[in-house]
Image: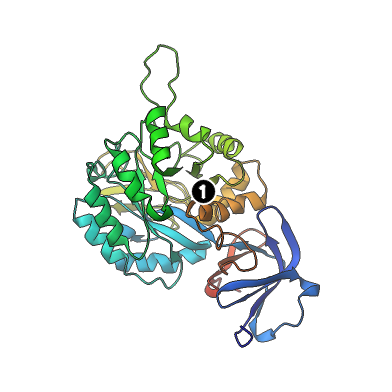
Amino acid sequence: MGDMIKTTIRHASVVLTDQVLADHQIQMCDGKIVSIAPDAAGGPVDEAHHIDAQGGYLVPGFIDLHIHGVHEYLIDNGPEELARICEILPQYGVTGFLPTVCPRPKGEDATLLSSLSTVESQGTAILGFHLEGPFLTITGALPKEALGTNDPERVKSLVAAASPHPAIFSISPDFEGIGDLLPIMSRNGTPVFITHTKADVKQTQAAIEAGARHATHFYDVFYAPDETDGGVRPCGAVEAILADDRVTVDFILDGEHVDPVAVTMALKTKGREGVALITDAQVGAGLPPARHMFGKDEVEYKYPGGPARMTENSCNPCTLAGSGLTMDTAFRNALKMLDIDLPQAIRMVSANPARVLGLENRKGKIAEGYDADLVLLSKDLEVEQTWVAGKNVFMQEDN
């Protein structure tokens, strides 16, 4: 390592998982963080390879577990658009993500996934592929292909198509035969997400025992079971998930997808490590309010960072169909809507999603030996620079 170039970021407010270290510097080399020290104790610096943070916040890179698109691009449209998304996301502080793929007819899904898996990112790292279907019981805004059948061979074909990346399935605990599929989906410690469900407590607990340990866009398309005893509110997936310490959750915190009180409740039951934020971003996210095509449906954004809703030209007008959120807006929303501090808000978009993916020992924190996935925020919490594995992949033009 002695002959390798070290890059130093000086005069930074370094955000750890539980505190902010003012007037600190970090050094990175060969894609890793190699030291963290007060500015005065940092030793000599190669002036040709240093960045002056000017008191800005240096935070771990953001990880988005659930995103369909951004700007004019949609992952379902193929590898070229996925490659563009990888190039765009660093401007929002995203250093790793799960491209989320909507369900297609059997065979077509594996073909698309196989082509997507060939993309070599020039920006944000692909950490796996998130398959939102076809093992669901409720479509929500997804096409009818989300409602598949118990088919272990289909699971295996999708896992193979995603290689060398992991295939991360979202499932409904009340899907018939899901207990046969979960052991295949969760091999090698691969997480399985719960979503789009009206499951009861027993069905949810069975899915958890079989390997489903995370709930995505929690509260959205999570229906309570039917009432069977007048006046007695039935418990279902929401309660079973909140009651189980092994299960983590994520939310779309745009102010409309979920009441912030639900996020606060989850933080109280899951603790600092158990709650993540996602975007569930659609084509059009990050752009001025407008209308865009999502598959065969048209969606509209009324304001920046707001939800995507189907228009009168779609099959279900006014239905929520993802979000216009970006990850930097999501953590700023957390500071505005929740009674939390900056380290906790940053944890919800970095360390916590890294933990969901089993990457908590190398991503999501600023610590020696961790991947140099970093974001420099201004004092106003706007993204100024982004590094992936020590490589600068975004810089504001005026910096």
Give the x, y percent position of residue 396. 56, 71
Q: Residue at x 52, y 56 (%)?
A: 354
In the figure, 320 relative to 327: above or below? above
Q: Residue at x 47, y 62 (%)?
A: 96
Q: Is residue 284 left or right of residue 137?
A: right
Circle count: 1
- Whether residue 134 is visible to the viewer of this picture, yes or no, is yes
Give the x, y percent position of residue 196. 36, 38
**Residue 346 image-quadrant placement:** bottom right
**Residue 17 image-quadrant placement:** bottom right
Q: Nearer the viewer, residue 303 or 140?
A: 140
Give the x, y percent position of residue 387. 55, 70
Q: According to the image, label 1 marks what residue? A: 277
**Residue 205 image-quadrant placement:** top left
Q: For the residue carrying disc 1, how many other residues have a C-alpha within 10 Å: few (<14), some (14-19), or many (20+)?
A: many
Q: Residue at x 68, y 72 (%)?
A: 35
The quarter of the image holding the C terminus is bottom right
Q: Residue furthest bottom?
A: 3
Secondary structure at badge 1 equals strand
Q: Nearer the viewer, residue 62 or 74?
A: 62
Give the x, y percent position of residue 141. 32, 42
Residue type for callout 1: Leu
Q: Nearer the viewer, residue 212 or 133?
A: 212
Q: Is residue 7 left or right of residue 313?
A: right
